[in-house]
Image (tube, rainbow, N blue to C red):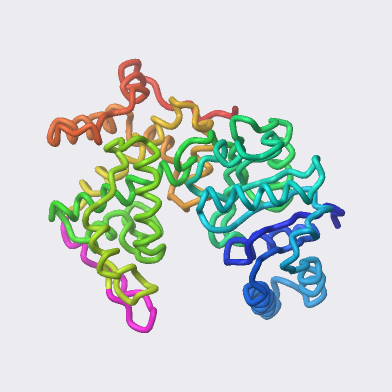
């Protein structure tokens, strides 16, 4: 067992999930929330999870008891004093997060690492208000944290890079797959995945296909869920908010423009499974019948969407947002893509991907479809993406 202690602020689904991951890895956990009710709910939910795992013979009763006992829950922030690391997992509001971190700095030692689980805010901006900004970095877990393998590790401009190495090692010890991402809007996953939703919405907006046809086309090439199924699962309000955040952070680059269709669904309250209606109707919270609407050749749908995804990955690589290996890991382990986007480009053929993008660019005349310079360079020189070990 580890003698290290991690503090987690926020006892919602994400914070509670991170607490479970740390406790399973042998760390002692101090879970802080201003709501006693939220803390009690967190404890009850973990007990239920452990009970199910015991029933499935995936956890022993003794291990379950020890894991749950490693988590101390409190509303008292001062209990974080002995922590080696504190992770905040609260509302996506930069002012609230900065206020919390300022309070934490007054409690913990100068050696304590501070981490934010933000999915969309600037880590550099969050660090800027700290007395010791070099101690803060991003650790972006994916929901549900106990099941999703990926963790994006995002250093701020001010971050001491030795802490990045330490946190990466800790995440590996926790059983996670850490990837290093530059502090830019959307980091890796939320940036690269935008066309999966955005281009699907554009196709439906033009009435070129129905949501069911788009979903069938994407599942036909190995995606576990189609974009409309997935938006209904995530919630149209959540997905739309992330899209708006990325769009604004990129100074309104048309590649990330939100969809008017999705905006109208949010306004109508058709948010997906949680409201009983989204792009599909749901009976008693259950998913609709399996999609079987792909009765015609819809290969152009997945070619259009995958080409846009590859273009985003190529652009991220050229801007050094992450290494080729980490870009691939992020999409296969973070959002369960059937293959890495760069590997997909190599398999499809760089010239074919470029031709697809140029066709779209010529048809629409929109900067949204501009091919990444790296794709042009690779095609011109008859090269592929180098996916070898870094």
Residue shown at the point (74%, 68%) measured from the top left = 74
What are the residue bounds of the magenta stretch?
A: 281-296
Residue occupying the point 43% across, 25% down? 318
| Quadrant where the image shows the C terminus | top right
Residue 32 as seen in the image, left or right of residue 326: right
Q: Residue at x 42, y 35 (%)?
A: 342
Which residue occupies the foreground of this view, 298 or 162? 162
| Residue 270 located left or right of residue 162 | left
Residue 51 place in picture, x, y as percent: 68, 79
- Total of numbered circles in the picture? 0
For the point 44% across and 50% down, the residue is 337
Give how far across and how far down residue 17 sits, in percent.
63, 63
- In the displayed orientation, state which residue is furthest to the top: 381
- The reply, left or right, for residue 345 in relation to residue 291 is right
| Quadrant where the N terminus is found in the figure | bottom right
Give the quarter of the image for residue 314: top left
Is 29 left, or right, of 35 in this rendering? right
Q: Is residue 180 above or below residue 377?
A: below
Quadrant of the rendered image containing residue 288: bottom left
Nearer to us in this view, 238 or 102: 102
In the image, is residue 331 above or below residue 207?
A: above
Magenta segment includes 378: no
| Residue 220 percent location from the top left of the image | 31, 56
* Majority secondary structure in the magenta region: loop
**Percent from the top left, x then y, of residue 141?**
58, 52
């Amino acid at each position: 067992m580890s003698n290290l202690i991690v503090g987690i602020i926020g006892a919602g689904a994400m914070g509670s999930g991170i607490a479970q991951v740390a406790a399973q890895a042998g760390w002692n956990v101090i879970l802080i929330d201003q709501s006693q009710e939220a803390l009690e709910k967190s404890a009850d939910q973990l007990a239920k999870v452990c009970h199910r795992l015991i029933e499935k013979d995936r956890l022993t009763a003794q291990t379950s008891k020890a894991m749950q006992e490693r988590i101390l829950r409190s509303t008292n922030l001062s209990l974080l004093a002995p922590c080696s690391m504190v992770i905040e997992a609260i509302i996506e509001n930069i002012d609230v997060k900065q206020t919390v971190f300022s309070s934490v700095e007054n409690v913990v030692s100068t050696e304590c690492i501070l981490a934010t689980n933000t999915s969309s805010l600037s880590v550099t901006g969050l660090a800027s208000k700290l007395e010791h900004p070099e101690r803060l970095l991003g650790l972006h877990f994916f929901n549900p944290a106990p099941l999703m393998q990926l963790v994006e590790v995002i250093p701020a401009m001010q971050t001491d890079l030795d802490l990045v190495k330490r946190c990466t090692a800790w995440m590996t010890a926790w059983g996670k797959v850490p990837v290093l991402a530059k502090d830019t809007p959307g980091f890796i996953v939320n940036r690269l995945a935008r066309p999966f939703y955005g281009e699907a919405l554009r196709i439906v907006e033009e009435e070129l296909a129905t949501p069911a046809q788009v979903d069938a086309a994407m599942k036909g090439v190995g995606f576990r869920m189609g974009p409309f199924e997935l938006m209904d699962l995530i919630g149209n309000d959540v997905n739309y908010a992330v899209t708006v955040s990325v769009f604004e952070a990129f100074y309104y680059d048309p590649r990330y423009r939100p969809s008017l269709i999705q905006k109208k669904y949010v306004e109508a309250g058709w948010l997906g499974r949680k409201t009983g209606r989204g792009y599909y109707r749901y009976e008693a919270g259950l998913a609709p019948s399996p999609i079987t609407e792909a009765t015609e050749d819809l290969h152009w749908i997945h070619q259009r969407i995958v080409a846009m995804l590859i273009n985003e990955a190529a652009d991220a690589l050229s801007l050094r947002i992450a290494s080729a290996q980490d870009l691939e890991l992020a999409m296969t382990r973070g959002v369960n893509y059937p293959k890495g986007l760069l590997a997909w480009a190599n398999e499809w053929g760089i010239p074919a991907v470029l031709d697809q993008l140029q066709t779209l660019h010529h048809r629409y005349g929109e900067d949204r479809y501009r091919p990444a310079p790296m794709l042009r360079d690779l095609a011109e020189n008859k090269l592929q993406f180098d996916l070898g070990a870094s």
